[in-house]
Amino acid sequence: MAMLLIILLTEAVLIGLALSHVGLVVLAAIALIVLMFYSFLSLRGANGRYIPLSREDMPWLYDGIATMARKAGLKMPRVLLLDEYVPLAYSFKDTVVLSLGLFEVLDREESLAVAAHELGHIKNGDTKTFPVLAYGRYLTLVLTAVVVLTGRSLSVVVSALTMACLYELAWARFHKEREFLADETALRLLETPMSLKRALEELKYYEDLRVGMRSNALPNIEPEIERKQRTSIIETHPTYDERVLRILIEINGGGIFKNRIQ
């Protein structure tokens, strides 16, 4: 994350070099607009087809999440059920969202494994950092465009484009690392760690149904969802197969992961 912040700061310096004192005004205006937009979205509550989960609705799910939350040192998160037939799961702030379609394709242990992954994101602070870094990405792209369009120095323009590319690469790498870490955290919360592997293998068959139904700014159980005929230049999520392999190594005592629940 430090690298992303350094790149963003460098872009700010470059726009200052490109536009002198005017650049500072432009930079402040752009940053303010992005901040206001982010704050507006952050203050919006969940609405629409969300159904707050109560213990009376699904005791096994409520109690299972409560137990894992205590184990992770978290307070009981808000759990929302999304009235959607497509199997989806994501998290924001201290909230876990699970679609009703998820329970149609996964058994109870696998559903809890998906919830554990989202608890891992909350535990590791991803629900706070992912949106910030996503808007940082938009800010970087805007700043780069301003420098390219107004910059008088070729070296400044090239530097801005280089920083934008570096941000994309660092952003994608950060996302992948946090997905692996959320999986690792989930394994330590589950009574049956292998259920996470089974859940990922099952969800793999529903990729096409989930196209366009989530935001990169939200931590979630799924990899980057693309139809097979499309190729993403920079992948922000590890594949299902990569995650399953890491899970198997961890369960079998490979010891390649350094981070642990504190």
Image (cartoon, rainbow, N blue to C red):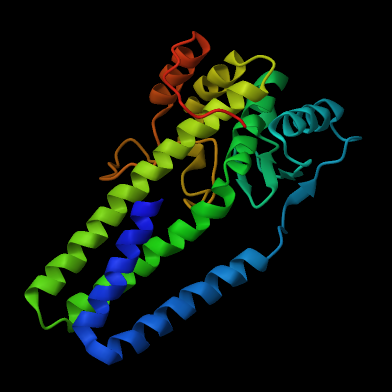
Which x, y percent locates residue 8? 34, 64
Quadrant into which the C terminus falls: top right
Quadrant location of residue 151? Answer: bottom left
Q: Is residue 1 above or below residue 164?
A: above
Q: Is residue 8 left or right of residue 70?
A: left
Q: In the image as oriented, which residue stretches furthest toward the left? A: 154
Name the residue furthest bottom.
22
Side of 37 where 191 appears, left or right:
right
Can you see residue 177? yes
Residue 74 percent across, percent down from the top left: 73, 39
* Residue 256 location, quadrant: top left
Q: Position of residue 20 (x, y in %)?
A: 23, 88
The x, y position of residue 12, in whole percent, is: 31, 73
Eyeballing the image, is 7 above or below 208? below
The residue shown at (69%, 29%) is: 103
Question: In this orientation, which residue lies closer to the viewer: 17 or 166?
Answer: 17
Q: How many marks?
A: 0
Quarter of the image for residue 54 reads top right
Foreground pick, 111 / 118 = 118
Which residue is at a point 32% across and 72% down the rendered structure image? 142
Outermost residue to the front: 262
Taking depth in this image into account, of 254 and 199 the one nearest to the observer is 254
Q: Residue at x 79, y 33 (%)?
A: 66
Q: Give the farthest residue toward the top.
A: 252
Q: Residue drawn 19% across and 80% down?
A: 149
In the rendered structure, the answer to whether residue 104 lies left or right of residue 153 reads right
Residue 87, visible in the rendered structure:
no
